[in-house]
Amino acid sequence: MSAQSDTVLSLDTGTAAPLVPTPRRIIGTNDLLPVNFLARGARAARTIARIVIPVSGKPGYVGYGTGFLIGADLMLTNNHVLSDPAVAETATAEFFYELDTDGRPAHVIKVKAAPRTVFLTHKPLDYTIVALEPLEGGRLPGDEFGVNRLNCEPGQGSLGQPVNVIGHPAGRRKEAAIRNNLITELLTDRIHYGTDTEPGNSGSPVYDDQWQVLALHRAAVTGANEGVRISSICAHVRDQDLTRQAADRLRDAGIL
């Protein structure tokens, strides 16, 4: 449209008046992001799986959670999703349980948990780290799907900061919450945020806009959702008496 045709009807006179340019471009907060935000989010999503757990004593019934890769064969989820090695022994991580770019169901890759290799858990911080079996052909899941390199430094996150959560709400195909999601409270070991989640999101990564994991989503609290700080999980892991297998893998993952 040419400058001469940029007009608006005046309500006072009923005549066409020039449309006056304004320097204002940002409405409220600045929501502009680099376009690679989308590609980096898609890359992060590859590391996230639906966890399927058969319900003991109820044939045909299963429970769902979410987990994400933090090492070549290490997955992080909640203690209340995988509470002990016996439960983890029955669990399967389903990668790409989602819709593809054409809106069709993607090809799902199922990987069994391997708690006899590595299993670390802590109920108060509601986390579990469990090993996964290799894929067909021997490649490790993280080598195929990617890994979330954890930043274990304390003090991550700030009030009002946007966060993004990817997981499997109610066990559905993978979904992302990237709108109207702000940190509302910062606690010693936890953060609260206004992100939409449902049961099944337990164990989801809580990302910042650079797709760095800030917290492990665990539950709803009054007026918000809650995640456990990654820095608190790292600090607790570092205080444990670890097996050599666990220590080697956690060191490779940059946690030790």
Image (cartoon, rainbow, N blue to C red):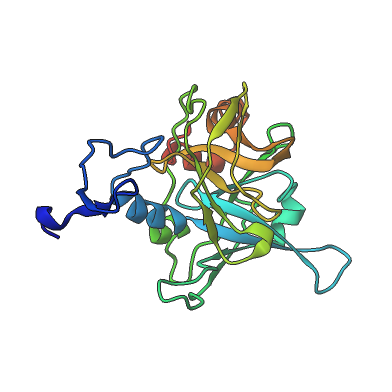
- Is 57 situated left or right of 29 in this image? right
Residue at image location 57% in from the left, 55% down from the top: 167
Residue 62 placement: quadrant: bottom right
Q: Would you place residue 42 above or below residue 253 in this image?
A: below
Q: Position of residue 30 (x, y in %)?
A: 36, 37
Q: Could you tell me if residue 190 is visible in this image?
A: yes
Q: In this rendered view, identify the residue nearer to me: 61 or 200.
A: 200
Residue at image location 75% in from the left, 47% down from the top: 84
Q: In this rendered view, identify the residue nearer to me: 5 or 150.
A: 5
Q: In this rendered view, identify the residue nearer to me: 160 or 16.
A: 16
Q: Would you place residue 35 above or below residue 229 in this image?
A: below
Q: Residue furthest front?
A: 13
How many numbered markers are drawn? 0
Residue at image location 44% in from the left, 33% down from the top: 151
Q: Position of residue 108 (x, y in %)?
A: 52, 72
Quadrant of the frame with the N terminus: bottom left
Residue 51 placement: quadrant: bottom right
Residue at image location 87% in from the left, 68% down from the top: 58
Q: Position of residue 92 (x, y in %)?
A: 64, 64
Q: Position of residue 80 (x, y in %)?
A: 74, 46
Q: Could you tell me if residue 146 is visible in this image?
A: no
Q: In this rendered view, identify the residue nearer to me: 68 or 241.
A: 68
Q: Residue furthest right?
A: 57
Q: Would you place residue 219 above or below residue 172 in this image?
A: above
